[in-house]
Image: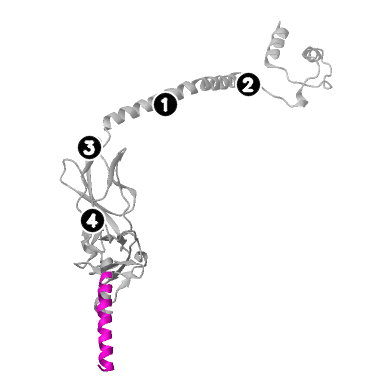
Amino acid sequence: MSLSEMFTSLIFILCSVIAPLLTDEEALLPAPQNISILSTNMKHFLNWSPVTVPGETVRYSVEFQGEYERDYANEIWIPISECSLIIVTQCNVTEDISATVPYNLRVRANLGSQVSKWSTLKVLFNRITTFLTPPVMEVSADGYHLLVKLEDLGPAFQFHIFYWRKGQERVYKKTVKGISSVVHLDTMEAGAEYCVKAQTYVEAINRSSNFSQTQCVRGPDGGRSTWMMTAVVSFAGFVVGVLALPFLAWKISQIFQYSCCPVIVLPDTLKVTESPAMLIHCRSEGTECCDVAVHVIPPKEILRLWIQDAL
């Protein structure tokens, strides 16, 4: 046997021994199965069935391929860093699905130096197929104001709100951003019932959800409200009257007293320092009384002296 024949025989024997071993290794780490994507309200999650190896922790890596990578970049695959060597069987791919075009995704299992084959989606995914849910809302009446509160779904969402007065055919529409806030819809008529329903809308994919369940509220009864307002105003007026009446009586008495019997205050130069009797005596005898200082004589005293002098 020649040397070349011996070398060929040796290679054949080695391949015959190693090939079954490699096949057994691959069989220990099968590829993930049941690859699917769940998309609700523009949130996209790739799911798959776990690969089970007794006593071992299997990890997974995920990659995606968009329309550009598939048609213009030699069909390259882009790894998703948040889903590299993870131990869970779900990957959030929302940030990677950034355009309304078909995407392909694939996942494979990793165990040490062993890797499985890639498992890909059977059908390309487009975010336009996401399931949009009707908005969660709460309708209320604050006095005569018709209000609605909507859940927060993020800046990419809008809500179409439809409202009407029950029993009338005309329906009004208002569009608001998908933020959590209270929206004023209309001013209600007294005792009338108003109904509201809404739907979610995403401009990026030009799709709307189904309508939410209709909610109705009734405005306050105008007659009852007027009666209660009258009662409150009357009670407030009574309280104010009770509190203000004593003050008004005192104030009127002060005004009456100062108007009929004013108190005159004279300067010090006009005040009489001697007794009033001496002042009258000087006047009757014609004596000089200039040196007598003057002081204020109360009105009652002057009246008494005048009567006494008259007698």
Q: Name the N-terminal-most of marks 1 and 4.
A: 4
What is the C-alpha distance between the residues marked 1 and 3? 30 Å
Q: Are marks 1 and 3 in contact (CB under 8 Å)?
A: no
Q: Are marks 1 and 4 in contact (CB under 8 Å)?
A: no
Of 254 and 142, nearer the camera is: 142
What is the C-alpha distance between the residues marked 1 and 2? 38 Å
What is the C-alpha distance between the residues marked 2 and 4? 88 Å
Q: Amino acid at mark 1?
A: Ala
Of 102 and 293, nearer the camera is: 102
Residue underneath mark 4: 132
Residue underneath mark 1: 236
| Secondary-structure class at tag 3 | loop
Coloration mode:
one colour
Q: Are marks 2 and 4 in contact (CB under 8 Å)?
A: no
Residue underneath mark 2: 262
> What is the x, y in percent for residue 74?
27, 80
